[in-house]
Amino acid sequence: MTKKFEDTVVLIAGAATGIGAATALAFAKEGATLVLTTHKKPADEVAAQCLELGAKAASTVLYDVAEEESSKSLVATIVERYGKLDVAFNNAGILPVTADLVDQTTEDFDWTIAADLRGVFFAMKYEILQMKAQGTGGSIINTSSVAGVIADPGMAPYVAAKHGVIGLSKAAALEVAKDGIRVNAISPGLVETPMTAGWLSQKFFQDWLPTWNSFGRPARPEEIAGIVLYLADPANTFTTGQNFLIDGAQTAH
Ligand SMILES: NC(=O)c1ccc[n+]([C@@H]2O[C@H](COP(=O)([O-])OP(=O)(O)OC[C@H]3O[C@@H](n4cnc5c(N)ncnc54)[C@H](O)[C@@H]3O)[C@@H](O)[C@H]2O)c1
């Protein structure tokens, strides 16, 4: 039986854990060829799991979103290995220290913007150049956050960066639609991943959870993966320039 993504080369940034890892496993079941990136330790275990689940191929690359050269060489490496790039999930990110704006340092602000916003700009630049050169279209999905739509106190740099990711995605979508390249953002609410483990282990946060969203719990990473596969699917040719909230109705009221 034909699998949905068996002729598809998919880049997943931030793939060792959390949302990226869950999405890699979901693509693997559909036969994709996967390139999994992390910035410190290669995502070898996830790559092995992907192969067991049915990925056509799965390999890893170390890459730093904050460095333009790293994005450029990542795309070159993918093309060298697999000949093309069809889908890019720009999902790497950091959660900075929680502090009021007046207590944030310039270094905290700059680093958050570099990792969470500028990295998406670098990534899209080289992904789009490659997709245009191929002439076969493609799909780019950028991870924003509910913090890209609403604000929380103590998170000004992250909120600014994630709002920026949505703007960047919309602007790019307008420029590349005629090349058959679609660009969308996804905005998860609270998800149980290494990024939020510190929050979720705290009593005051656990007391808060029942009213956080309509389920009273964080999402599991695999509950975010489905929207990424939907947006990657070339059948959804008219879906571009949008932001998709997956937040358990957190922002519905
Ligand atoms: N967990 C949540 O509640 C939540 C909610 C909304 C949005 N998000 C976003 O989802 C994305 C994935 O986060 P997650 O929750 O799965 O956490 P995670 O910590 O499991 O994943 C983050 C990934 O980003 C990578 N990364 C960090 N800095 C990098 C750098 N400089 N260069 C390259 N890669 C780097 C890490 O290697 C890691 O794989 C992030 O963009 C995050 O902001 C998370």
Image (spheres, rainbow, N blue to C red):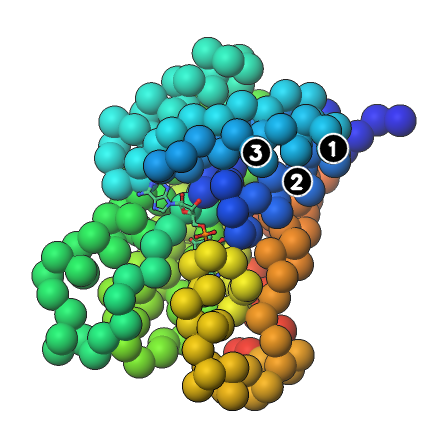
- Which residue position holds label 2? 25
- 55 sits left or right of 58 in the view: right
Amino acid type, mark 2? Leu
The type of residue carrying mark 1 is Leu
- The image quadrant that residue 7 belongs to is top right
- Quarter of the image with the C terminus in it: bottom right
Mark 1 in CB contact with mark 2 (< 8 angstroms): yes
Q: Which mark is residue 138?
A: none
In the image, the residue with mark 3 has its CB under 8 Å from the nearest atom of ligand 1? no
Q: SS of the residue at dot 2?
A: helix
Using the rendered image of the protein, determine whether residue 134 is visible from the camera's viewpoint: no
Q: Residue at x 43, y 26 (%)?
A: 61
Spot occupied by residue 97 in the image (x, y as percentages of width and height): 26, 66
The span from disc 1 to disc 2 (Cα, nearest Å) is: 7 Å
Count of numbered marks: 3
Q: Which mark is residue 45?
A: 3
Circle 1 residues within 10 Å: few <14, some 14–19, many ≥20? some
